[in-house]
Image (cartoon, rainbow, N blue to C red):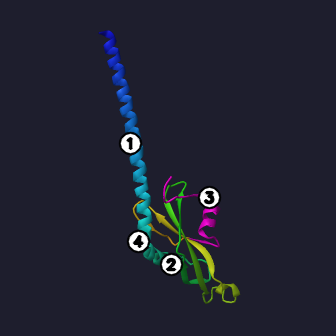
Amino acid sequence: MGSAVVWLVIGVVFALLAAGLAAVIAIGFLMQKRQALGRTDAVQRFTQRREELETLFFEQAAASGRPRGLAWVDCDFGADQIYARDRNSGQLRALVPVTIRFEAVAGGGMEDNPNVANLRAATAVFHYDGREWSTTGQVIFNLEPAEALQHFQHELEPWDVAGP
């Protein structure tokens, strides 16, 4: 009778271990599924609000007073974007290529600069807080999105929309 109890205890222990392992696997699967849904949701939200976000970006960037002596005239947004994750905060970013046109501000000291009329390539930065996309009008001049991601690799890492 004693050996039957031992085998019963061993069987119960193995059953509990198997159940625990199954639970860990199930939780991991559910977390991956949730993360994938979060990625899809973030991309969909950006796509849905992109036109509104572009307008907000232009308004905020133009109001920033940068570059000094120049007024924002136009900002043409490229069709693509690169997603990145802030290494410190975990917050998502969308990096969008832009071409910006400026004009000299009267009395701003740039009126005689022949380069004012040159179009400027840059990257517009958008932020996702887990619920909404926004922008502060942050622009990275002279770098396309892939170049900006490389340049700021100590702060940003590529974020694959498809997941790990």
Q: Give, as a single range, the part of the protein colored magenta.
A: 139-164
Amino acid type at circle 3 is Gln
The residue wearing badge 1 is 26
Say if 71 sits above or below 79 in the image.
below
The residue wearing badge 4 is 48
Secondary structure type for disc 3? loop
Residue 112, located in which quarter of the rendered image? bottom right
Which badge, 1 or 2, is on the more N-terminal residue?
1
Q: Nearer the viewer, residue 37 or 156?
A: 37
Q: Nearer the viewer, residue 154 or 38?
A: 38
Amino acid type at circle 1 is Ala
Say if 5 sits above or below 22 in the image.
above
Which badge, 4 or 3, is on the more N-terminal residue?
4
Q: Residue at x 41, y 67 (%)?
A: 45
Which badge, 3 or 2, is on the more N-terminal residue?
2
Q: Nearer the viewer, residue 135 or 5?
A: 5
Q: Residue at x 34, y 11 (%)?
A: 3
Q: Are marks 1 and 2 in contact (CB under 8 Å)?
A: no
Judge whether residue 109 can be spotted in this image: no
Q: Residues within 10 Å of mark 3 (few under 14, many from 20)?
A: some
Quadrant that contains the N terminus? top left
Q: Where does the image place residue 135, in percent across and percent down from the top left?
A: 48, 70
Amino acid type at circle 4 is Gln
The residue wearing badge 3 is 153
Q: Are marks 1 and 4 in contact (CB under 8 Å)?
A: no
Residue 114, located in which quarter of the rendered image? bottom right
Secondary structure type for disc 1? helix
Amino acid type at circle 2 is Phe
Say if 74 sits above or below 164 in the image.
below
Q: Residues within 10 Å of mark 1 (few under 14, many from 20)?
A: few
Q: Residue at x 41, y 48 (%)?
A: 31
The residue wearing badge 2 is 58
